[in-house]
Amino acid sequence: MAHYQQLQTLLRRVEEAELIWAKLDQVVERYALNPRAVASLYDAILGLRIRHPSYRSAIHSATGEEITEQTTSRDLKVLADSGLLMAHGERRGRYYTAGPELQALRAALMEKRSRGLADPFHIVGDR
């Protein structure tokens, strides 16, 4: 039973990740943003803090692209100005979190999540 529950959890997470990426692709297209932003928006929607180094790392991991500090600053400013990310702190301590639209996407996803795992063995117990 435990292995089956682990498999259900893994499948749910993969399906949720696919759904989030698809939604974020639509958001990036709607705001006419650079597609490289999707990786960090994904991190933000999961509740992670986005900082300059993590933004650059996420882009490198997702696309293999190396970006400059200036490009990083410009991208994060555009994302914050659009409301997709919220800036916290100043200068070197600055980080970004999911803005209201991303928070709403996450809330909608969590609402759809089933409240429990299906028990495939309930039939056996009924006999």
Image (cartoon, grey):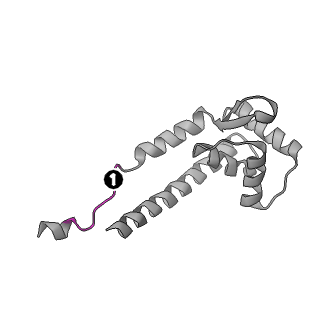
Label 1 Cα crowd, 10 Å radius (few <14 / some 14-19 / many 20+)? few
Q: Quadrant of residue 127?
A: bottom left
The number of callouts visible is 1
> In the displayed structure, does residue 121 sit left or right of residue 89?
left
- In this view, 70 is above or below 59: above
Which residue occupies the extreme left position in the image?
Answer: 127
Q: Residue at x 74, y 42 (%)?
A: 51
Residue 119: which quarter of the image?
Answer: bottom left
What residue is pinned by disc 1?
116
Residue 42 percent across, percent down from the top left: 63, 49
Instruction: Find the magenta span and give its range.
Output: 115-122
Q: Amino acid at mark 1?
A: Gly
Predominant SS along the magenta part: loop
- Please tell me in which quadrant of the rendered image residue 30 appears: top right
Q: On the rendered image, what quadrant is the N terminus found in?
A: bottom left
From the viewer's perspective, is residue 59 above or below residue 1? above
Give 18 or 60, whichever is nearer the viewer: 60
The residue that appears at 69% across and 48% down in the rendered structure is 40
Q: Where is residue 15 shown, x and y percent of the image?
A: 49, 58
Q: Secondary structure at mark 1?
A: loop
- Check if residue 121 falls in the magenta segment: yes
